[in-house]
Amino acid sequence: GEIEMEIAQLEGEDREAFLRDYNIERPAAERIIAMSYELLGYISFLTVGPDEVRAWTIPAGALAPQAAGTIHSDFERGFIRAEVVHYDELIRCGSFANAKKHGICRLEGKSYVVKDGDVINFLFSV
């Protein structure tokens, strides 16, 4: 309990060093959340804007229009397509714009099954 409390209070490189020193791969809270999502059948996708990154929870197996609908019903109703890049690929590219420029960003349609960790920009018209 005390170690987990200390981990929760640390940030950045201090946190990473502490985890390495204690040979902890992931703190208990992160493991519990991940296990809960798995047991409940949920995944997360992300949206990014100029000043905000947000995670959205959806049922595993949800299609792109359903995921769009978690943001706003107009997004689902007017869904055209989704620009998708996985979080790990986005980090490697440095930005959504770079992912597009390097051809890593994919265009997906209404039948796309959203994957855990997808970063999505929804294109819609209402």
Image: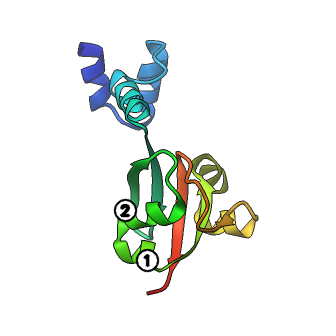
Mark nearer the N terminus (2 vs 1): 2
Residue bearing the label numbered 1: 77
Residue 77 placed where, x, y %?
A: 43, 77
Label 2 and label 1: CA atoms lie apart by 11 Å
Q: Can residue 40 be spotted in the picture?
A: yes
Q: Nearer the viewer, residue 102 or 105?
A: 105
Q: Nearer the viewer, residue 60 or 49?
A: 60
Q: Residue 66 has which mark? A: none
| Residue furthest bottom as drawn | 126
Q: Residue at x 45, y 62 (%)?
A: 66
Q: Residues within 10 Å of mark 2 (few under 14, many from 20)?
A: some
Residue 28 placed where, x, y %?
A: 35, 21
Q: What's the residue type where badge 1 is placed? A: Arg
Q: Can residue 14 be spotted in the picture?
A: no
Residue 94 falls in image quadrant: bottom right
Residue 46 placed where, x, y %?
A: 46, 56
- Look at discs 2 and 1 and give the one toward the viewer: 1
Q: Nearer the viewer, residue 99 or 47?
A: 47
Residue bearing the label numbered 2: 70
Q: Secondary structure at mark 1?
A: helix
Q: What's the residue type where badge 2 is placed? A: Thr
Q: Is residue 6 left or right of residue 21?
A: left
